[in-house]
Amino acid sequence: MKKKISMFLLIACICLLSVAHGKEKQWWEKWDRFPKEDKAPRIMPQEVKKLMMAGEKMVFVYNGFDVEKVVCGSLYIPYLLVPPEHDGSRINLKPIPKDWWVMCY
């Protein structure tokens, strides 16, 4: 009887391990949690001001922790709803025109 129980437990453990390790990650789970800073181009505040004064169309996006104040008119996208935490499907935004600047901070 002990042999049967031991064998059953062994098979159950093997099955559970194979299921846990066999699950392939979703596309958004493969993103680096801490991307290198040199991957995204940076722009200085003075340059943003010049673009605004020149009449360039832009949208500001804040994707950080919940804070009291953000740049007036910014889109707030909670960081827990986007990769690598989730796939972003719960965020419903109007499409941003392709000729607009997107300023993320």
Image (tube, helix red, strand yellow):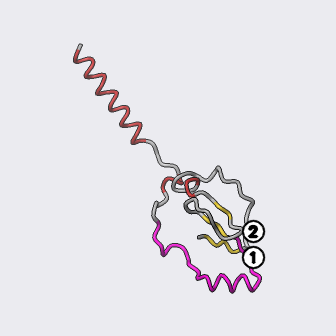
50 is within the stretch colored magenta: yes
Q: Where is residue 76 in the image (x, y as percent from the top left)?
A: 65, 61
Tell me the tag on residue 66. none
Q: Say whether marks 2 and 1 touch (CB < 8 Å).
A: yes
Q: Measure how far apart labels 2 and 1 are at the Cα level.
A: 9 Å
Label 2 or label 1, whichever lies nearer to me, is: 1
Q: What stretch is highlighted in magenta?
A: 35-59
Farthest residue, direction front: 68
Tell me the tag on residue 97. 2
Q: In this view, does 1 lie to the left or right of 13?
A: left
Q: Position of residue 92 (x, y in %)?
A: 70, 54
- Depicted 12 relative to depicted 34: above or below: above
Secondary structure of residue under mark 1? loop
- Location of residue 10 (image quadrant): top left
Residue closer to the observer: 70 or 101: 70
- Location of residue 98 (image quadrant): bottom right
Q: How crowded is mark 2: few (under 14 residues within 10 Å), some or many (20 or more)?
A: few
User: Which residue position is annotated with label 1?
Assistant: 57
- Depicted 58 relative to depicted 26: above or below: below
The image quadrant where one finds the N terminus is top left
Residue found at x 32% / y 27%: 11
- Location of residue 47 (image quadrant): bottom right
Residue found at x 45% / y 64%: 34
